[in-house]
Image (cartoon, rainbow, N blue to C red):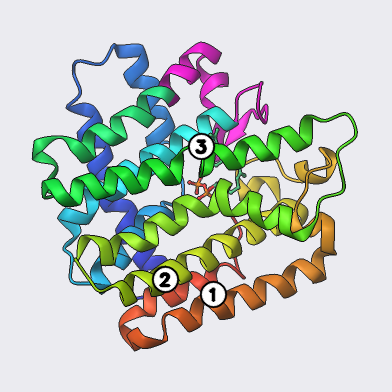
């Protein structure tokens, strides 16, 4: 299967699952539910669900089990985008080629829709009909909370905004940028990659291999995102570009230039491919995801 076909497979599965879960939530006030649906069902590559499903498949875990985790993770990713677009954060009007949730509704609805997606994700993992054993559900809740929370994505956003809102931002080091990206973007991608061996009850060696892969892929994803911001086309990317330079943001491109960032991307891709060596051709789709980082257009 081509990478695009595998991504499309994940997209169809997770979008159906998310649409069904939200449509069944008749106890949610209508305006809140509509804003949540707008946030979750309004496009997106579904790259994190793809990683969950592929990582699960590598360790013999079926799609139905992995989907609960994929849907929960995507809900958290979508919440982060809704909050990141708010005027108090990145102040964006367009996302995924459409008006952002606060533009389509208003700020308070967007804040509440984000809060609702964050909390419902954990409800889906923890409720008795999740399809996960209590021990696995508990592990997933703990791991996802850590990845999304103050020592993960929220912490990374804090470091990013704090540096950016200073009157005279300090010149960032490579270490600072890597740390920021490891938390802000990397933590959810790392979580997605680890779910296969965790759900499958695999060995510590498998968990370590997929963790190394996930960490490298997360960094590669962020570098490719920075390259897209610097060189991409807004219509194709689906959101404003050239924002990082205008905001004086600390990225690998601002520190090392385009060629320097591409060189770090190539090194990082090699690290990710190397971690998958023990799995040979069975990891083909996860290897394709590494190549995708060098070719992203959105
Ligand atoms: C608000 C707590 C909080 C965190 C926000 C995710 C994030 C942290 C900010 C988004 C800003 C940004 C451009 C981050 C870089 C990488 C990233 C997460 C891009 C968006 O992910 P994609 O490309 O988006 O997977 P789609 O739309 O395809 O789902």
Determine the residue positioned at 63% across, 35% down: 158
Secondary structure beneath dot 2 equals helix
Q: Say which element carries label 3.
A: loop
Contact (Cβ within 8 Å) of mark 2 with mark 1: yes
What residue lies at 76% left-to-right and 37% top-to-bottom? 163
Magenta segment: 85-114
Q: x, y (%) of residue 145?
A: 38, 40
Lower position in the chain sequence, tag 3 or tag 1: 3
> Which is more toward the observer, 3 or 47?
47
Q: Which quarter of the rendering shows the C terminus?
A: bottom right
Q: Which mark is residue 150?
A: 3
Give the labeled residue for mark 2. 3
Callout 1: helix, strand or loop? helix
Above or below residue 15? Residue 274 is below
Q: Of 1 and 152, which appears nearest the observer?
A: 152
Residue on which the image places disc 1: 291
Say which of marks 2 and 1 sits in front: 1
How far apart in space, not on screen, are marks 3 and 2 (Cα)? 33 Å
């Amino acid at each position: 299967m081509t990478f695009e076909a595998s991504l499309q497979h994940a997209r169809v599965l997770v979008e159906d699952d998310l649409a069904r879960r939200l449509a069944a939530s008749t106890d949610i006030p209508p305006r809140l539910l509509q804003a949540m649906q707008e946030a979750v069902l309004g496009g997106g590559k579904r790259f994190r669900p793809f990683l969950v499903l592929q990582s699960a498949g590598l360790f013999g875990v079926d799609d139905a089990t992995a989907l609960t985790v994929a849907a929960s993770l995507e809900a958290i990713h979508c919440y982060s985008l809704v909050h990141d677009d708010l005027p108090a954060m990145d102040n964006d009007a367009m996302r995924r080629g459409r008006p952002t949730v606060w533009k389509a509704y208003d700020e308070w609805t967007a804040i509440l829709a984000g809060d609702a997606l964050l909390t419902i994700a954990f409800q889906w993992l923890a409720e008795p009909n999740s399809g996960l054993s209590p021990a696995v559900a508990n592990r997933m809740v703990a791991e996802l909370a850590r990845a999304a929370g103050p020592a993960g994505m929220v912490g990374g956003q804090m470091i990013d905004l704090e540096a950016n809102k200073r009157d005279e931002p300090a010149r960032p080091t490579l270490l600072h940028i890597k740390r920021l990206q490891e938390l802000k973007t990397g933590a959810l991608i790392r979580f997605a990659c680890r779910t296969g061996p965790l759900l499958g009850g695999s060995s510590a060696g498998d968990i370590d291999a997929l963790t190394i892969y996930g960490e490298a892929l997360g960094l590669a994803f962020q570098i490719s995102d920075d390259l897209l911001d610097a060189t991409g086309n807004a219509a194709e990317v689906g959101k404003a570009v050239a924002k990082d330079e205008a905001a004086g943001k600390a990225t690998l491109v601002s520190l090392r230039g385009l060629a320097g960032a591409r060189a770090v991307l190539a090194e990082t891709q090699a690290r990710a491919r190397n971690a998958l060596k023990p799995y040979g051709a069975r990891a083909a789709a996860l290897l394709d995801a590494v190549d995708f980082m060098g070719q992203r257009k959105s």
